[in-house]
């Protein structure tokens, strides 16, 4: 399987939408309950670029996954923090694509001088937890029963990667 990692382009949006909507229908990776439209995702797409990279994996000319850094929160003091998202086509999961994405997005986060990356991982997603821990993310805590999907309450575990640990570098 040959993969090409590149910046997302607007023409990738229909494939990215299908990957996302599959997650809406089948996974707790997103708490959206209704499938998104192309127009919904167009607004999301244009919130990325520059400081907020959005990358895709392409295999045989088809987008098979995407990864992004987004604003962690709106307040200005959070400018050096980003939230990580990774979505992979059901046919390409558990093939090492998550590892490829995290290597690239962490590299870009360092180039953009982010201080920290934060991920929210829904309870039961052991593959995503293992992937994050492989890259040095640490478990920070759990928000219990914050989402209701598939007729049950969902917990979200938060993981954080400090790109520059100022407490350790001062000592």
Image: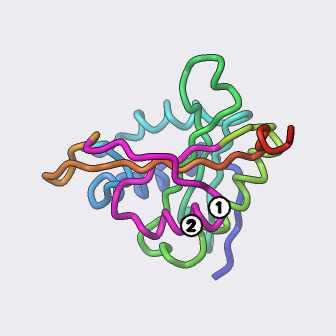
24 is within the stretch colored magenta: no
Q: Which residue is mark 1?
A: 101
The image shows residue 29 at horizontal and vertical percentages of: 38, 54
Which of 119/88 is in front?
119
Q: Is residue 139 something that shows in the picture?
A: yes
Looking at the rendering, the stretch of residues picked out in magenta corresponds to 117-145
Mark positioned earlier in the residue sequence (2 or 1): 1
> What is the residue that sits farthest to the left in this orientation?
151
* Mark 2 surroundings: few (<14), some (14-19) or many (≥20) residues within 10 A: some
Q: Residue at x 13, y 52 (%)?
A: 151
Which of 58/53 is in front?
53
The image shows residue 134 at horizontal and vertical percentages of: 63, 68
Mark drawn on residue 131: 2
Looking at the image, is 142 positioned above or below residue 5? above
Q: Is residue 34 something that shows in the picture?
A: no
The image shows residue 71 at horizontal and vertical percentages of: 58, 31
Query: Viewed as shown, does residue 101 lie left or right of 73?
Result: right
The image shows residue 75 at horizontal and vertical percentages of: 58, 17
Which of 169/5 is in front?
169
Q: Quadrant of the N terminus?
A: bottom right
Q: Residue at x 42, y 50 (%)?
A: 157
125 is within the stretch colored magenta: yes
């Amino acid at each position: 399987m040959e993969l090409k990692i590149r910046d997302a382009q607007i023409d990738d949006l229909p494939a990215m939408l299908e990957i996302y909507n599959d997650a809406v229908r089948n996974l707790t990776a997103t708490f959206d309950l209704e499938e998104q439209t192309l127009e919904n995702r167009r607004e999301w797409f244009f919130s990325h670029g520059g400081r907020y990279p959005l990358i895709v994996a392409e295999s045989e000319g088809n987008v098979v996954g995407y990864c992004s850094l987004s604003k962690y929160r709106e307040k200005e003091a959070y400018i050096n923090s980003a939230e990580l998202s990774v979505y992979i086509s059901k046919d390409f999961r558990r093939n090492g694509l998550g590892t490829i994405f995290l290597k690239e997005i962490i590299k870009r986060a360092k180039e953009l001088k982010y201080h920290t990356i934060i991920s929210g991982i829904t309870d039961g997603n052991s593959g995503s937890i293992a992937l994050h821990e492989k890259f040095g993310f640490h478990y920070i805590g759990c928000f219990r029963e914050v989402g209701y999907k598939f007729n049950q309450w969902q917990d979200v575990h938060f993981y954080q990667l400090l790109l520059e640990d100022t407490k350790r570098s001062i000592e």
